[in-house]
Image (cartoon, coloured by chain):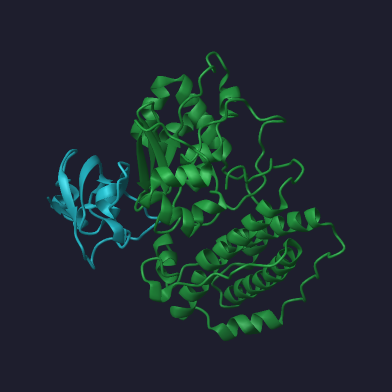
Chain colours: A cyan, B green
Amino acid sequence: MTEQSTRPRFGVGSRVRVKMENREGNPRTPQYVRGKTGVVSQVHGVIYNPIDHRGSYPPLYSVVFAVGEVFGGPSADKLSVDLHEEWLEPA
Amino acid sequence: MVQQAAPPHGHMHDYEAHVQAVEEDLEYYRVKRFEPRVLYCHRRGLITLYDVLRAAAALPPPAPPDTAAGLEQRIRALEDGLDAYVRGNALASVDVGGAKMVIEDTRTERGDYDPAFRIAKKAHGGTLAERVAQLEADLRDYMRLQDAFLQALVARGALDADRLAAARTTAPAPSPWNGARIVARAWVDPEFKRQLLEKGREAVRELDIPPGRLGKMGVAENTDAVHNVVVCTLCSCYPYDLLGDTPWWYKHDSYKQQIVRDPRGTLATMFGLQLPEHMELRVHDSTSDIRWMVIPRRPAGTEGWSEEELARLVTQESLIGVAEPLAQPPAGAAPAPRANRLTDGR
């Protein structure tokens, strides 16, 4: 893993869009947020987690989405989804 | 799901809830824990299905269930059998070709990310007595297959026979009581709460609770303005190595699908929890390396209570965020959780 990929690219408050497809990325990115836009609420950095997987992924963020924007409907509730940087692009 | 669980050692009040919990858990552990391991070893050439068949032929015949026993006794036997099945699954994590099996492998094998690979669960139906009989038969079959699989691994030299024998005895289990103690300390000690929110599991060592080592623990604090709920839509991630295993509904698709689509409505209909309209509701989907727990709001009128008294108000449901803590401690002795289903990866 290079120095560049471990330094978080987004900060708290960044608006980010989740990529639709990313074969190289962590498969643990739910379908329902793909293509959706949210706001970074926490920056967790690179997490060492050898029980769950072999390598480590790029920095992790908690990204907050509005339920109404993700699924439609009148809900004002929020979804906080943890996403790795390789799935995110600036929005 | 509201009020589904009886006290751990009390009289069993609600047979239906116990049987449903065993049905859900047994299929869960077969489909999500056991069979992916068989597939993992099979795909990598560590065993063939014929190895399992050969090992099965060498097993002693299973003991018939005690059908003369009362329903409650049979349901308890099912719960104990389920625990043994879960412990057996933990033994079936073996290294193949020097590569350690990680949780991600199990998720892939069972089709979490690809519906084409998904292992189907069994449907249940009939009267309560029929369902209990069906579970007894299923459990007997599943245990037998598990035994055969473990013996096949021993025969292939992938598993140590002594380790297998020793591991059927259990270590003290992590439990929701850990979570209750963590929350009670956070309620009375602002500095501990700050450390907990900042560092997660590292902070709990102060309470002599083993912190576990499954990635990072995220802690979401409920306040008068924000209520947090935890789900894992892709599987059923939870800091179980620290807080004990989750209730069956946490692993059920109905909860996983509905709580993200209609959080407020799901809390009301599934759990009877009505949140004030002005309160923000935030659902944490444990999609990656962080496993989340909730610090519920401290109930009013508990000023001056001891940590132990406070901890007894904290239910497993309130640690997930689908309920508020109790207003009064439950009757009876302090909790002593029965089950140890916790030695296995999710």
The reply to whether residue A29 is visible in this rendering is no
Task: From the viewer's perspective, tell me whether residue A20 is left or right of residue B253.
Answer: left
Q: Relative to B67, does residue A71 appear above or below in the rendering?
A: above
Q: Position of residue A72 (x, y in %)?
A: 27, 53
Q: Point out the image quarter for the N terminus of chain A.
A: bottom left
Q: Position of residue B123 (x, y in %)?
A: 59, 69
State the residue lying farthest toward the front: A74
Q: Relative to B8, does residue B258 appear above or below in the rendering?
A: below
Please count the marks in the image: 0
Q: Position of residue B222 (x, y in %)?
A: 40, 31
> Between B282 and A23, which is closer to the camera in this rendering?
B282
Report the residue at 71% width, 69% height from top: B134
Task: From the viewer's perspective, tell me whether residue B225 is left or right of residue B8.
Answer: left
Q: Relative to B302, does residue B88 appear above or below in the rendering?
A: below
State the residue lying farthest toward the top: B304
Q: Position of residue B93 (x, y in %)?
A: 51, 65
State the residue lying farthest toward the right: B68
Report the residue at 61% width, 42% height from top: B3
Task: From the viewer's perspective, tell me whether residue B235 is left or right of residue B280.
Answer: right
Report the residue at 70% width, 60% height from top: B81
> Between A82 and B192, which is closer to the camera in this rendering?
A82
> Between B324 and B159, which is closer to the camera in this rendering?
B324
The reply to whether residue B190 is visible in this rendering is yes
> Between B338 and B54, which is closer to the camera in this rendering?
B338
Task: From the viewer's perspective, tell me whether residue B58 is left or right of residue A84.
Answer: right
| Quadrant position of residue B78 | bottom right
